Image (cartoon, coloured by chain):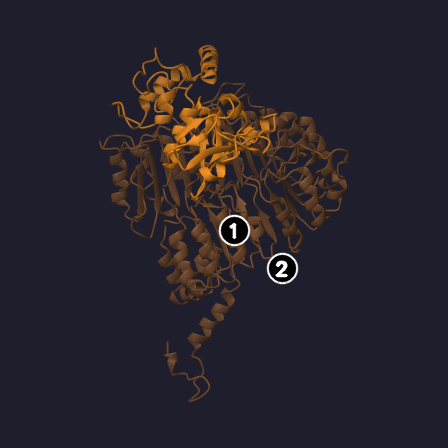
Chain colours: A brown, B orange
Amino acid sequence: MRDISAEVPGGGDYHPPCPDQVLENVLENVLQFLTSRRDRNAASLVCKSWYRAEALTRSELFIGNCYAVTARRVTERFCRVNSVVLKGRPRFADFSLMPPNWGAHFTPWLTAFGAAYHWLEKIYLKRMSITDDDLAQISLSFPSFKELTLVCCDGFGTSGLAILASKSRQLRVLDLIEDEVNDDDVDWISCFPENGTCLESLSFDCVEWPINFGALERLVARSPNLKKLRLNQFVTLGQLYQLIVRAPQLTHLGTGAFSPPEIWAQGSEEPDYEAAFSACRSLVCLSGFREVVPDYLPAIYPVCGKLISLNFSYANINAEELKSVICHCNKLQTLWVLDTVRDEGLEAVATTCKDLIELRVFPIDASEDSEGFVSEVGLTAIAEGCRKLQSILYFCQRMTNAAVVAMSKNCPDLVVFRLCIMGRHRPDYLTNEPMDEGFGAIVMNCAKLTRLAVSGLLTDKAFSYIGRYGKLVRTLSVAFAGDSDSALKYVLEGCSNLQKLEIRDSPFGDSALRDGLHHYYNMRFLWMSSCRVTLQGCREIAQTLPQMVVEVFTSESTSVKDEDEYVDTLYMYRSLERSRNDAPAYVRIL
Amino acid sequence: MDRLESYECRDLNLKATELRLGLLGSDERESKSGSGVTKSHKRAFPETAEDCISSTNSSRTPDTDRNGELQDCTPPAKAQVVGWPPVRSYRKNNLQQTRKISSDHHHHGNGGGMYVKVSMDGAPYLRKIDLSVHRRYPELLQALENMFMVSIGQYSESEGYSGSDYAPTYEDKDGDWMLLGDVPWEMFSSTCKRMRIMRSSEAKGLGCQ
């Protein structure tokens, strides 16, 4: 390529741009429109010039594992980023399977971004630790900062939120989803700009302490663009009323406690909740109901007909109470409920919600020996009624292969199938057979399946099905299943698209581990806890695959010394870097 | 403890009488197991180790094995296992709340813990303490002293807390701030919403309820 430095803008000889340069300019302009990161990754592999052009034009960064790459490498390659998604801990950390302080700190990333991406507007973090200082730094480093979404994060508190609210004056989105938020007794709600805010979305349902309601009311009143508001359980029904009458433009509402305050002023009448909801003509998504008093559910009837998404997963309501609401919800696409609604409630859902795409049924009592209020009956009803179902998460104590097979046949569009039979090793309730055939049918009949979580009594056969038919499966979760190494081998050899494999308490050992050597670098991670993998086995993998970071850890301070000892947890992931330097003492990186 | 016992009873009834293919087959499957390692392997699994009635991995003969228990690397069936079923603790904690009928504001963790937040004047961050593990004031005070590395002094009914710069107080159900120790322990532990270790100068005037 001719040296373009010969061109002198505004003076001197005019040299028309060389064809290669033109091509590159055109390429940049075209690549601007490429949004999918998979497409962009593909484009960047074509040749160096495409690599460069793509790097110059990528504005949205997605980093699925914060330890797969360093911030420096990222900022050196991409220079015009305005949006970042960063994920840290693996999912099993949510279930207390990972000791504390493992890592996934945002601070080093923030430092790098602060230097490189002055115009950063959006940050999305999942399972990372972010401090109050980080929140303050975000405001300092990014004058155009607009959106912060934190999912399952920790390390910060109300003081950090206060600084962010007051200093990031263009903030549009502040979504705190299932985070652990420290309460430093700071009234952060009062810290948003006085003259008016740009807020479009504010979610704080996970903040476990009361907020200043008066300040919230004033905030809502001066946020004309507010469309999504998710309140925590300390907002009573009466307070909710006061908010929604000021903000009838809301599209997404987290209703807080949905119970009236304990003390009513003598002689005052209850507000007309139903009228207030009626006025919210754009409401399509409801959640909250944290301490729901079912008598007040009729207030939401006026909006049910337009609802696309309903989250009752904290609402302890029975079948009748659910029915009274669900019968109006014929446009519903997403429904989360507690199993307190029973099979009967699910039957009602199946009757009305013909467009249902996602269903999650959580247990009111999340323990192994709990009663379990839904069963194969509910699953079958959903299978027969909701043919468009794409995603299901179902906790139960009782299940049959027949019901799972029925779902596999009736719901061919299933992309996510997660069944959790809470009692470990439970067979088919009616036949006492293992659940192999049911899960087998799912992988056989659901051609689009990408995410699968299995449970119940499962032999190696189930895994042979998964390996043979689960060609598109990217995420697989296994617990207390399988008989031998063969099970894991079937999966590692068969599931060519596997990205995330998380296994606990299953009898898979070193021999099976070796079987995945050809594939591990294509995966985001492998997690195996309480299996039969030895330190020696892990070491072999680490030596054979230098591009994998192999972390081994034990709970408490006992470390695995004897090479033939089983390790408690193996967490392995691909990385462009050498092992991280922020690992705590109990983590051994081989 | 009740839960563990009832599980045990249920376990004996169900498993003993269950017709399961696994009963005979389990031994076959175990012997076919690929890893072929026979020695007992240590596993540091303190949560379940406490709950296990029989030790894991050591007695796996058909006679003594729990009927139908196929997985010899997992604890016996009746132990409560960490992180299972896989429901996030955030959700578990909040669901506990919805099952309560009364409207008090305690956070109940698994197993009935009663966590309340404790702040101390001058300390930047709050801590949580589980009231259910204590039975009397002196124990609680000791725990607070350890947590905040501070000495709280001696309590007397007439004088409050003397001999230190701090006094422990709590907010009760009605929103009133009281001095720790003014009411009987039972009443305190059932009405305490949160605690604050105040500077002695500010704590004067409390406890005159």
Q: Nearer the viewer, residue A555 or A202?
A: A202
Look at the image and tell me in which quarter the N terminus of chain B lies: top left
Is residue A252 rendered to the left or right of residue B62?
A: right
Residue B194 location (% of width, % of height): 51, 34
User: Which element type, helix, strand or loop, lies under badge 1?
Assistant: helix
Label 2 Cα neighbours within 10 Å, binned few <14 / some 14-19 / many ≥20: few
| Residue under numbered circle 2 | A195
How far separated are the C-alphas under marks 1 and 2? Answer: 16 Å
- Which sits in the foreground, B73 or A292? A292
- Residue A399, picture quadrant: top right
**In the displayed structure, would residue A541 be above or below residue A15?**
above
Which chain is disc 1 placed on?
A
User: Of helix, strand and loop, which one carries label 2?
Assistant: loop
The residue identified by callout 1 is A162
Residue A258 lies left or right of residue A164; in this view the side is right
- The image position of residue B2, as x and y in percent, is 47, 16
Q: Is residue A52 visible?
A: yes
Image coords of residue A6 (percent x, y): 38, 83
Asked whether disc 1 touches disc 2, contact meaning CB atoms under 8 Å apart, the reply is no
Query: Could you tell me the amino acid type at mark 2?
Result: Asn
